[in-house]
Amino acid sequence: MPRPRIYTSMDEAIADFPDNASLMIPGFGPGQPTNLMAALWRQGATGLTTISNGVGFAATTEELRGLGDLVVAGRVKKVIAAFTASTRPSRTGTAEELIRSGQVEAELSPQGTLAERIRSGGAGIPAFFTPAGVGTETATGKEHRDFNGRTFIMEHGIFADFAFIRAWKADTAGNLIYRRAARNFNPIMAMAARTVVVEVEQPIVPAGELDPDQIHTPGIYVQRLIHIPEGGVLHIDRATARAILQVRYHDPVPEGQE
Amino acid sequence: MTEKQPLNRDQMAAILAEHLPDGGIVNLGIGIPTGVSNFLRPEQEIVLTSENGVIGYGRLAGAGEEDPDVVNASATQSVTLNPGAAIVHHADSFALIRRGMVDVTCLGAYEVAPDGSFANWKTTNEEWNNLGGIGGAMDLAACSKQIFLALEHTTRDGEPRLVQKCALPVTAPAGVTLVVTNIAVVAVRNGKFILEQHAPGYTAEEIQALSGAPLEVSPNFRQVSV
């Protein structure tokens, strides 16, 4: 098993990203591969199928270009997500209009179903039954089956060509550790894609330095690693209503909270 | 006659908090419910879980306490972690929900009906087109033991949100047991709305007039205590 390749440039790490590929994008607030997404924006790939919690909005700065921008730019063919439209009538996005008009295909999943579809895809399980969505529009056209007197619907696993991952720590073997709620979709998406590219907050340490008992994603799933370089985006400041870029070069974890 | 004082969002959150069962595992959805974490008393021994995999979080983080990696279901509000907190990934956070570990899920909503059905993921009636904002609501609603809702009693245009049948597509066909609005607290039992509490200055008749389904007035009908 070859060790993952370690890059120093986000653009180089995804330079070969092909058109029409499928891509897992983690993040639920924290845990987004912000730098890899901005690099993909620059790289130009088109015809994408994306798997993410939400579709989001177009960004205000180049460093924060992400899925919302790709959708609005017409570079996304299909989105699979738990949020394809705003829940506030006053805040509808352009992406929503593109889906409504059929220019972008959408597959809306309840969030737990979405997470389990990803987990299943990465675990070699082609389909499963869940009670979520029974009796709602999302069950439209899906196989229903009763188990122990309760009705479930069948959902399918998802596997993608690429996953962009955001990790807190990594070693040269590709082993990953996530921090707090930044973990969210990262571990399951890292298992559900052919090529896994990871942006890492802390400097990548030699194999053997991370405790094997503390690893969240084993390195055998990881093909490419890159430490977020100086000037890269570490976090997005959510204290203000506008997502203002916050760039830090140091470990954000306060003393005693590791 | 007391002056009419509709409840604000914090008061609605406080009412949700006081109705939670002691020792319960509780999930708080986006909107008014995320505010509940500020009104829990330690002796209630509630454990809050969030879809993003945070188990055992506490109140909203104050200035200087924010950790960019610790947020609630809104994905933007920073929260504190209580001693004994644990983090899991997204599939495991829904595994515990699907397994039935959540005693109460608190959600925002657009409409609720006496059969316990409610709507909160789609703002239009257009045909199923894969557009909507479901988030974790359907998983939570299908699998939690109880669903508490927090919503304004009427729309901005004055239309009732407590209705005989949801006009918007439902999030779950059943399961709501409590509805907290800006003017009333309504239990949902046996296919009926039961009016339990009123905001200061509101009579049962006035609350009924702003509702789209019959309300049975509880023998214990009283003013809210917040």
Image (spheres, helix red, strand yellow):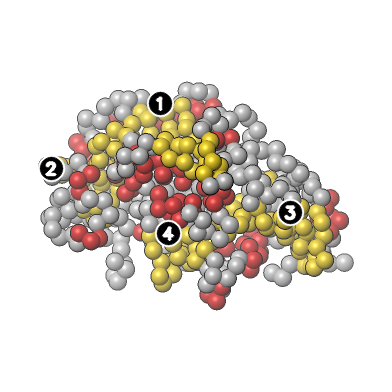
Label 1, on which residue? Answer: A77
Label 4, on which residue? Answer: B54
Q: Residue at x 47, y 37 (%)?
A: A154
- Above or below B177: residue A102: above
Callout 3, which amino acid? Asn
Residue A73 at least partly seen:
no
Closer to the N terminus: mark 3 or mark 4? 4
Q: Are marks 3 and 2 in contact (CB under 8 Å)?
A: no
Q: Residue furthest bottom?
A: B43
Label 2, on which residue? Answer: A1
Badge 2 element: loop
- Above or below B13: residue B132: above
Q: Position of residue A134 (x, y in %)?
A: 57, 40
In three-dimensional space, the C-alpha distance between marks 2 and 1, rounded to whole angstroms, equals 34 Å
In three-dimensional space, the C-alpha distance between marks 3 and 2, rounded to whole angstroms, equals 61 Å
Q: Residue at x 48, y 60 (%)?
A: B49
In three-dimensional space, the C-alpha distance between marks 4 and 2, rounded to whole angstroms, equals 34 Å
